[in-house]
Image: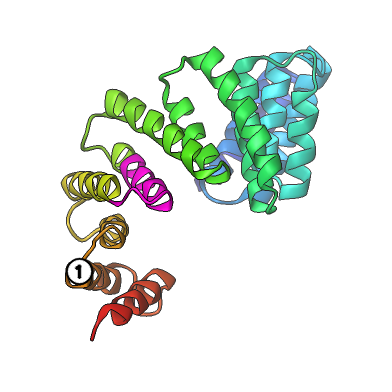
Amino acid sequence: MLRKLFEDNVARCGKEFGADDPRTAQAARDLGFFLKNAGNNQAAAAAFQRALQIDEKNLGPHAPKTLAGVITLASVSPPREAEVLFRKALTSPGMNSALAAPALAALGDLRFQAKDPAGAAAAWRFALQHAELAQGKESDAVAKILNSLSQVTEPNESVLLLERARDIAQKNFGPNHPETATCEINLANALLKVGRTAGAAQHAQTGLTAFEASLGPRHPRVSIALTTLARAQAEKKSAAALYRRAVEIDRQSLGEKDPQTLADTLALKALLP
């Protein structure tokens, strides 16, 4: 019923104002965002494409609103088509940092999914520069890009990136927010990779406490924090106790056959006599 209301509004605007009127483009955009939020990317792409064609005709291909439309269309397009659209937008003379930051971040995601860490790193580094210019060095967008970039950098740099992301999250959200907790767990994992187990345990415990406070003690992300903390334990008995609790949460929240449940169960068995 809601979809029909949006579709009827597009038809009404087209009839009343004309097929190429900006109000028709906005109605098509509204329909596209509704469909995107409903998970229907294919139908959303058609609506966004219509809005983009109108904007290109009225504003030109390099107008900020047109470029924003290209980026929006890319967000619901298949990976190969999305990458072409992102690159098209990024090479436009009308591109600015506010638009470039999310486009480059998304391009980095595509390169990462394509198992191209070097390409992902390059895109995310450029995204970081533009996000700092557009939104400030302590913005949420910067923290998210730092977390992404940490996945494709050498371990010691990853630690530095994640420390900065954690500091931003603490300032913007507070110590017990899920975003802050996620940064703490990511940092703990990075510290484990460089052999700094004491620091890893400290940050894992902080992240665990924050997840429990914000999401409740039985949430799947609490399980992830528990397994990270378990990996930082020197004693098998302590690690096993943490894995045992993680498995209990996994089974209740995710089910017996979920990959996370199976992995944590296997890790627990390896620690048992």
Segment colored magenta? 182-197
Q: Residue at x 54, y 14 (%)?
A: 134
What amino acid type is highlighted by mark number 1? Arg
Q: Is residue 146 above or below residue 243?
A: above
Q: Position of residue 231 (x, y in %)?
A: 31, 61
Q: Position of residue 190 (x, y in %)?
A: 41, 47
- Give the class, few, some or many, for how many residues have Cα within 10 Å of label 1's Cα (few <14, many ≥20): some
Q: Residue at x 43, y 52 (%)?
A: 193
Q: Is 254 or 208 nearer to us in this picture?
A: 208
Instruction: Judge left or right: residue 95 versus residue 222.
Output: right
Would you say residue 267 is visible in this rendering?
yes
Q: Residue at x 75, y 28 (%)?
A: 52
Q: Main secondary structure of the magenta part?
A: helix
Instruction: Judge left or right: residue 85 versus residue 76.
Output: right
Q: Position of residue 109 (x, y in %)?
A: 61, 43
Instruction: Judge left or right: residue 117 versus residue 180.
Output: right
User: Which residue is identified by label 1?
Assistant: 245
Q: Which image quadrant for residue 66?
A: top right
Q: Is 92 or 118 nearer to us in this picture?
A: 118
Q: Is 215 or 264 nearer to us in this picture?
A: 264
**Which quadrant is the C terminus positioned in?**
bottom left
Q: Is residue 212 above or below residue 261?
A: above
The answer to whether residue 190 is magenta is yes
The answer to whether residue 178 is magenta is no
Provide the secondary structure element on which disc 1 rests: helix
Would you say residue 19 is visible in this rendering?
no
Residue at the limit of the structure toward the bottom, as seen here? 273
Q: Position of residue 37 (x, y in %)?
A: 51, 44
Please tell me how many numbered marks the rendered image carries: 1
Q: Is residue 169 above or below residue 94?
A: below
Instruction: Judge left or right: residue 128 versus residue 161.
Output: right
